[in-house]
Image: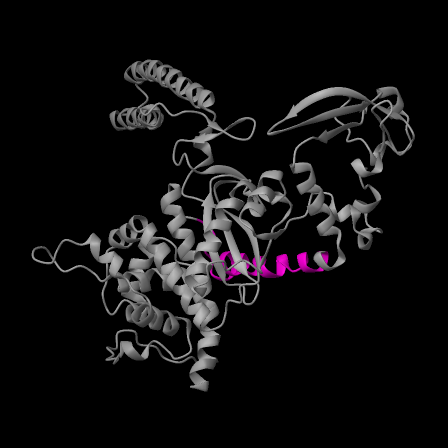
Amino acid sequence: MARYKETNIGQGQFIEVDLTRQILPGSYEETLQYLIDRKIDISKFDAEYRNDETGAPAISPKVLLKIVLYCYSRGLITSRPMARACTENMTVKAMAEDIEPHFSVIADFISKNSEKIKDVFTQVLMYCSELGLIKGDLFAIDGCKLPSNASKEWSGTIDELKKKKADLAALSGRLIEKHKKLDAEDKNNGELSKEERTAAKEQRKRHIERINKKMEYIDQFFVDDPQPRLGTRYEVQSNITDNESAKIKGPHGVIQGYNGIAVADSANQVIVAADVVGSVHEGNVLPDMLDELKGTMQTITGKEEPLENATVLGDTGYFSEENLEEAEARNVDVLIPDQQFRKRDESFQDQKCHENRRYTKEDFTYNENDNTYRCPAGKRLEHKGHVELNSNSGEKYQAKSADCKNCPLVKNCVVSKGGKHPMRTLYISDSKGSNILEDMRNKIDDPRNRELYGRRMQIIEPCFADIEYCKKMNRFSLRGKRKVTGQWLLFCMVHNIGKCVPKRAVSRRAG
């Protein structure tokens, strides 16, 4: 017959705990403690406190920073689990110096100190530079789409939200009339006891209260007369919970959240600049991110022009005339491919994207005598006049529908749009942008630059994998761009501190 060890959970134990020995040398928490205690100047936080003569002593910002950053590194991204960890987890108790802050104190610290968190982020970068983790000659930029503390249910255009409000009001009216009728029927129904009638009445009352609460929620949104959020062409859906967030199509479906932008250095994937946008498209933030990157590198290196010999890699979402002009104005070398660059790459000639390469302007021949173009099949594209193209303008040339309809090259020339007859159109820009875009296409077609661009994913994607998957920082717990920006900087800071751990261990052994 099996025998098992006896247990006795009622036996009292006396366990000696030395909190200073809970932080092991060479660990993440030891590096974090060293940084906050010895390298980071937090004097800017002192301005928030007015208790030098009266009031209770406050919890030191150093302690709160260590709690937040360490808990983030362990996947605890909301204040209640953090506060609970300060009472249950010995390592967190050691980082908190045996202080047990209320969850509201932690939440207020994160949400109210976005600008000061940015200063701490820069100081962490300076320590990364001190360890030799930042080279400063090659950077990559990209976005990481994360859900925020907002619901997709409360998204819509201004007109859609107004209609939703009217529908809820109508529903509330119908429910009230229906429930009055049911209340009268319950009184005349002898089969129901008094308790059952009371329970049914309370249930209907709660239903109406929920509807009215939703109406109040929408009413509160319209108090300030919100204006429609405009995208590049159409109105973007607003959100009642967090109107600065957006519906974003991510790898796991549509989310309501923000796009966390990061610029990483190529040497050790250290994030040197970060921001958030409430948009699925981050292409228009490139000028601001270049300014942010330059300012950070100036602080780190002390150089007036720290990006003079550096290159910034961006994906096709950043390819636009405006971005290239802004980079040129800032004297920053960028390598941003157009959407068709893979189809021009001979190394992809056996793949479908190369087989279906769409003909570009270079495949058409211009005839100056009659101001027409000839397509690869020899058909004419007639001049249709001067047109405006968003922020650009140019000349329009168009083929005849009959010529394109039965053309054997139509699959490589015309993008089919529903049941319409195919018809190839060329737009020849007359602005400076045509040269800038063409120069970038030629630049990315250089084999050396293609090889350099191939490093982009190796630089930036490991940062997002570490933040989202390894550290479990996979959503924002705050609302509003200012607060979310502060939290994104904290996420990036956690990643950067992790890069310091092995390097610091090596320097300690060498010292």
- Residue appearing at x 89%, y 34% in the figure: 376
- In this rendered view, identify the residue nearer to me: 329 or 313: 329
Is residue 484 among what the camera can see? yes
Residue 296, by quadrant, is bottom left
Residue 53: image location, x then y, percent: 7, 57
Q: Does the magenta stretch include residue 215?
A: no
- Residue appearing at x 43%, y 57% in the figure: 491
In the displayed structure image, the side of residue 230 where residue 176 appears, left or right: left
- In this rendered view, identify the residue nearer to me: 3 or 22: 22
- In this rendered view, identify the residue nearer to me: 187 or 391: 391
Color scheme of the displayed model: one colour
In the displayed structure image, the side of residue 427 where residue 310 appears, left or right: left
Which corner quadrant holds the C terminus?
A: bottom left
Is residue 260 among what the camera can see? no
- Residue appearing at x 38%, y 35% in the figure: 241
Residue 215: image location, x then y, percent: 34, 24
Residue 505, by quadrant, is bottom left
How many circles with numbers are drawn on the protein? 0
Q: Give the range drawn in magenta.
A: 450-475
Q: Is residue 451 magenta?
A: yes
Residue 110: image location, x then y, percent: 32, 52
Residue 139, by quadrant, is bottom right
Q: Is residue 482 above or below residue 406?
A: below
- In this rendered view, identify the residue nearer to me: 350 or 401: 401
Q: In this view, does 190 lie above or below 415?
A: above
